[in-house]
Amino acid sequence: MGTQPQPPANTGLDENMACALCYLLGLLTGILFLVLEPHNRNPRVKFHAWQAILMGVGFFALYIALGFLGIVLSFVGIGAIALLMYPVLGICMFLLWLFLMYKAYNGDNFQLPLIADFAKKQAGFAG
């Protein structure tokens, strides 16, 4: 006799908490929530997971670009400018991270420019 498939176990996480936790470790938690049952079937959680992943990749790319800019500017003698921009970028990233977690926890689906449309499409999210 065949066994009936069991419904996925409830994780005990509220939807808003799951959305906020998508941003906790950026790329890592974004991927985690894309594969965890039952969250991987919730379009809102998937939207925040995709947005967290894309934000993490975007900031990583900005850090790399800033490093190359510092190398180029060092040939001109003003490479310290790029060095001073690292903490500014870090503070901006930290504030955006806190803001997104706060908004997601409060049920707001704040959409980041340039990446939200792709995240919504991947998640099948209409919000």
Image (cartoon, rainbow, N blue to C red):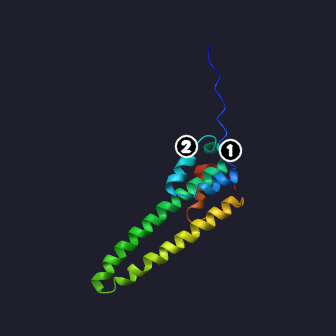
Relative vertical location of residue 98 with respect to residue 41 in this rendering, above or below: below
Label 1, label 2: how far apart the Cα atoms are: 16 Å
Crowding around mark 1 (Cα neighbors within 10 Å: few <14, some 14 to 19, many 20+) is: few
Quickly name the residue at label 2.
Answer: 35
Where residue 19 appears, x then y in whole percent?
64, 54
Residue 40 placement: quadrant: top right
Residue drawn 54% across the image and 53% down it: 30
Residue drawn 40% across the image and 73% down it: 66
Relative vertical location of residue 43 with respect to residue 56 in this rendering, above or below: above
Relative vertical location of residue 20 with respect to residue 90 in this rendering, above or below: above
Crowding around mark 2 (Cα neighbors within 10 Å: few <14, some 14 to 19, many 20+) is: few
Residue drawn 67% across the image and 54% down it: 17
75 to the left or right of 34: left
Q: Amino acid at mark 2?
A: Val
Residue drawn 64% across the image and 41% down it: 38
Q: Amino acid at mark 1?
A: Gly
Quickly name the residue at label 1.
Answer: 12
Where residue 82 appears, x then y in whole percent?
39, 79
Question: For the residue labelled by badge 1, is the local secondary structure a helix, a strand or a loop?
Answer: loop
> Which quarter of the image is occupied by the C terminus?
bottom right
